Image (cartoon, helix red, strand yellow):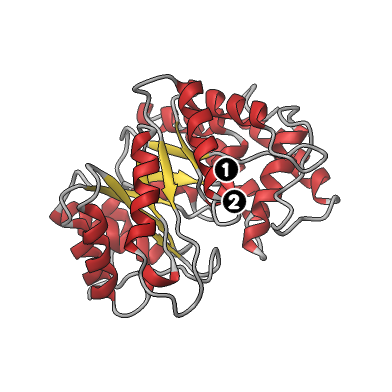
Amino acid sequence: MTPVDPATLVRPRRSIRGMSAILLPFTRDRRIDWDAFAAHVARTAAAGITPAVNMDTGYVQLIDDATRRQALEVARATLGPGAEMVAGACVVDAPGAAFDEAAYGRQLEMITGAGAIPVIFPSYGLTAGSDADVVGRTRRLAGRVETFIGFELGTAFVPSGRVLALEAYCDLMQIPNCIGAKHSSLLRRLEWERLALRDRTRPEFHVFTGNDLAIDMVRYGSDWLLGLSTAAPEAFAQRDRWWAAGDSRFDELDDALQALGDFAFRPPVPAYKHSMAQALHLKGLLETDEPHPDSPRRPASDREIIAALLDRISTAGPGLGA
């Protein structure tokens, strides 16, 4: 395949579609802080960003169905009827497990019942076998819903992740009710290839970047569904408005947000969720910076660095970082 020249993909003054994964916050006694969760959903929507609940940032692999359902119910009650929301359809299994279509069906029913668009999370059963197997199983799930978003997730995030070959991604794009796919390989080249393919074959399809180490992929035609944005949805919204307006302030704000992403998404990558809690706590938006009890933690010394990074965001976009 001829390498893609990213310069040919740049789309100035494009309106960007953003979706932000909502952090699930915890109290000092390690209970879910539903009031803070609802407030975060409301802030995200008020910024003009679509809330994404029960994603990796919401510890979807670590919570049970009752908690997932409550997150959907709280978010819907906060947003009101008709407001756009997306949510992760996650089945937790083990290596060697068979594809559990019925379990996915229950997740899809829960999500669509809350008026949300499902994002189909990988599982060992879904991602086992050939790329054709994965796409075939996804087609079966597509038959259960009106619309959905696919998901390529690298194993740096979860061991059951799978990134498709480009030919299989093309097949995924041809599923009519798949409106887009989140791409989280953390590799620019693979995303550029997907964007070029999208532009040639299905221009209305959304490539939602999940590359928290390269959030400027929006320059090239990606939209976004990120965990990093949970720390500063208003700043991401301002950045996107500046891009659509052709305002050069986009660059400095994007750089400031990327600096936070580079620090928060260092190995071990799953510990970024604690970094996001630290950021929101420093901004006075959470009672504590506690992560899920079973999620990796960052050292307390990170807080000083995150505070400096938030100040940089505030300087690049006045009033946004603190």
Relative to 2, say whether 257 is above or below.
above
| Quadrant in which residue 138 is drawn | bottom left
Q: Label 2 neighbourhood size at 10 Å, few (<14), some (14-19), many (20+)?
A: some
| Quadrant in which residue 166 is drawn | bottom left
Q: Residue at x 50, y 48 (%)?
A: 55
Picture coordinates of residue 170, whole percent (x, y): 20, 63
User: Do labels 1 and 2 touch, CB within 8 Å?
Assistant: yes
Relative to 87, say whether 181 is above or below.
below
Q: Is residue 119 visible?
A: no
- Residue 136 or 256: which is nearer the viewer? 136
Quarter of the figure that contains the C terminus:
top right
Distance from the alpha carbon under mark 1 to that under mark 2: 6 Å
Q: Residue at x 37, y 76 (%)?
A: 128
Q: What label sits on residue 63 in the rendered view? A: 2
Q: What label sits on residue 67 in the rendered view? A: 1
Which amino acid does the dot numbered 2 rest on?
Ile
Q: Is residue 286 visible?
A: yes
Picture coordinates of residue 83, whole percent (x, y): 37, 24
